[in-house]
Each structure stands twice: as structure tokens, then as C-alpha cells.
Image (cartoon, rainbow, N blue to C red):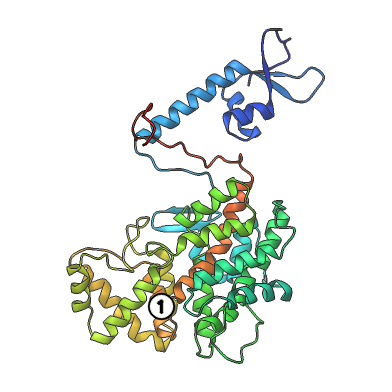
Amino acid sequence: MRDQEAPVGPAERRLSTKETAELLGVKPETVYAYVSRGQLGSHRVPGGRGSTFDAAEVEALARRNRRESAATAGAGAELSVRTRLTLIEGDRYYFRGVDATELAARHTYEEVAEWLWTGRLRPGAAFTAPEASAAVARRAVDALPEHASPTDRLRVAAIAAAAADPLRFDLSEDAVLGTARVLIPTLVDALPPVLHGHRDEGPLARRLWARLTGRPADDASLRVLDTALALLVDHDLAASTLAVRVAASARAHAYAAVSAGLGVIEGPLHGAAGGLAHRLILEVLDRGSAGPVIADELREGRRIPGLGHRLYTGEDPRARALFTLLEDLPQAAPALAAARDIVATAARSTPLHANVDLALAVFTTSSAMPATASETVFAVARTAGWIAHALEEYGERPLRMRPSGRYVGQRPPQPLPE
């Protein structure tokens, strides 16, 4: 480390640690990491505890970092974001270093969310929404047309809850966690119930069940739903999560960051993929075999929903965990058989494994839920992960998610248009 107390020359422009960190686009701790690696020199402030840095040396390091970043981008590398939340490796995934499927098997959705947020387990954690917050969100959702999608309703509920919270701009960790514990149950309670006579009490999975199907809940089915929520809490930097981090980078409050994520998941390649798998299973059940159904999909040049995942070479571990639980549901047997038929039939042309969308589709079809149910489950579950990523991003340099455009249009000067 080159931290000296030598006098500074009058012509030498010095920067504080904060100014150096801002110029380099890093945290103050990273500045001292540069010093310890010999990449940057520093002088201790006489009589003080801080250090100063030569401006020319800092600017040279910043230019070198930019060149290295540009070279990496030119080599075709994808955007990389530091995170301590989720690791996907070797066809398994981990929340803060703990196997996510084992965590979901042993803990409730609320407990897994708390682990992801804080790195601490809160046994018996329960999320409840104040009646005032839930009432505002319900009124806003009730004003939507009947054909509104679940994601439409959740977005409106999030906006209504934000408008009712005058302290939403407090981005401290405690405040954001308080928002999360209220927002998630508010989103659920704002959805219109399907199961008549249901009372909004008990675990989140039970309250969500009443919004997805008119069938009475049984313990085995509730366990599948709760496990699905816990498995879907986070999955690295998915498209919706990136949108959340961009919003948080601009210091949008937690409700707005969640709204950004909800805006992305409605695409057929993300949160809505489970609905496509739901319809596929129903068609296989209706026609009695996956063969003609898969043939039609391939003839039309469509991707088979529920199969394959870019992050796993084998079976999606989330699907494997859910299939194991679904085997204990007698009513799921026909849909499970249809799913296995889909995988086996499609493997003749493309060796793809089942992903979580296919497992969710088995659950939703066998529980008399609509095709949009998996999208609702996904959105509610992932809200916890979005909050975790927003919290991480609030600790980073503001507006760091600001790439530069590569202009490919006509070079100026061009004449003014007629």
C-alpha cells in the first residue's frame, strides 16, 4: 500500500476519497483496494484520518478502466453486475450461498424472502398488509375492466400502494424492507378472490390460492404453491430484474422499481411463458398424446414452451423440485403424464429438458386455475427478489446503469429537413 504522509506539491491537484470514487465509478472501499494493489498512490491528510489522491493519476486509471471495459464489450461480453444474492452454477442455484431448492423445501416463501433480503432467517415470518393500504389497492384494481390481465392488476395495485405511502422515497434499508413486507401482501390482497367465502388471513400462499382457483385448498396443494413461490424468488439477472436495477440505479423508490419489473414480465419470453405451457398441456390432454401437438408446434416453427433454459444444460432444478411434490397430488397425475410425454416426444428432435414453466403448468392445470395463474405466481414471488436487487443497487454508485449508445445513423452535418 502506498499511503504516505509526504508533503504535497503546490502544483499537484488532489482529490478526496469521495471525489476519487465518483470519478472511477466505484465505492470508496474499492479506491483503497486500488491502493493496496499498487494501482493508485495516496497521501494521508496531515492531522486527519482520510487520504488524498493525485488527480492526474486517478484520471489515467479511469481512462485505463474505460479502455478495458470497451475491449471487453467489443469481445461480445454480456452486461455483468456484482451481486451477492443468487449464484447459478453446475445446473444448481443458490441464494446467498445456500442451495435454493433445499431452502424452499424447508422454509416458507416469507422465510426465504427474508433470507434473500437480509442473510438472516426469521422463523415464522409472515407478511400482512395494513387494511388501509390493501383497500386503496383494491379500489384501484376494481376500477379496471374485467378483461384486465393479472399483471395489469398487480401494476395498478403497486402504483396505488405507492401513492398511499408518503414515506416511499426513504431508501434506507429498514424503510425498503418495511415497504417490501407490506407491498407483497398488498399485491395479493388487491387481486379479486375466486374462492368465495375466503377470509384474508394465514400464510401468503393460502391467500394467493383463493385468487387463483375456486377449489378449496388442501395442505398438499398449498405446499406446492408455497414451494413454487420460494423457488421463484430470484434467478440472477433476468430481464425484469435488470429493469428493476436500472430503476433503482436512478434512485426510483421500491414501488417504482417493482413496477419496472412488472412491466417486463408480461412478455411471452419471460413471466407469461407459463401460460403457454399451460395451454400446451391442456391440448395434449384433450388430444390424448403429445405427438400431434408437438408436430403442429414444429410445423408452425414455434418454440416448444416449457422446455429448455439457457442457464441449465440439464433439467431446471426448480422444475425437478416441483415435479417431486406434484407426484403427491393425485389430481396432478394426468397433467404430469402429459408433461412427461411432451418432454419425451420433443426429445426426438431437440434434446431439451423441462423447465419451471412446464412444472408450473402441471400445477395450474391440475388445480383448475386459468392459464394466467403461473404469471401471477411468478410476479408475486419475484417481487421479493426485485426488492433484494433494488436494495443492492441503492448501495452502488447512482446512475451506473447508463450505457452509451453507439450511433449508426447519418453523420452530421445534415441539411435541415424541408
Tell me residue 50's x, y (percent).
Answer: 74, 25
Question: Which residue is located at x 61 percent, y 76 percent?
Answer: 190
Could you say which quadrant of the image residue 311 lies in?
A: bottom left
Question: Which residue is located at x 58 percent, y 26 percent?
Answer: 34
- Tell me if 259 is positioned left or right of 348 in this view: right
Q: Residue furthest top?
A: 10
- Tell me if 288 is positioned left or right of 89 in this view: left
- Above or below, comparing residue 213 to residue 396 in the picture: below
- Above or below, comparing residue 61 to residue 182 in the picture: above
Tell me residue 92's x, y (percent).
Answer: 43, 58
Q: Is residue 406 visible?
A: yes
Q: Residue furthest right?
A: 47
Tell me residue 253's x, y (percent).
Answer: 65, 54
- Above or below, comparing residue 353 to residue 135 in the picture: above
- Tell me if 153 is positioned left or right of 404 in this view: right
Tell me residue 125's x, y (percent).
Answer: 67, 70
Question: Which residue is located at x 64 percent, y 44 percent?
Answer: 395
Q: Which SS class for mark 1? A: loop
Depth order, front residue of 322/134:
134
Q: Quadrant of the N terminus?
A: top right
Q: Which residue is mark 1?
A: 371
Q: Residue furthest front?
A: 418
Question: Which residue is located at x 50 percent, y 57 percent?
Answer: 94
Tell me the amino acid under the disc marked 1. Answer: Ala
Q: Is residue 122 visible?
A: no
Label 1 crowd bin: few (<14), some (14–19), many (20+), radius 10 Å:
many
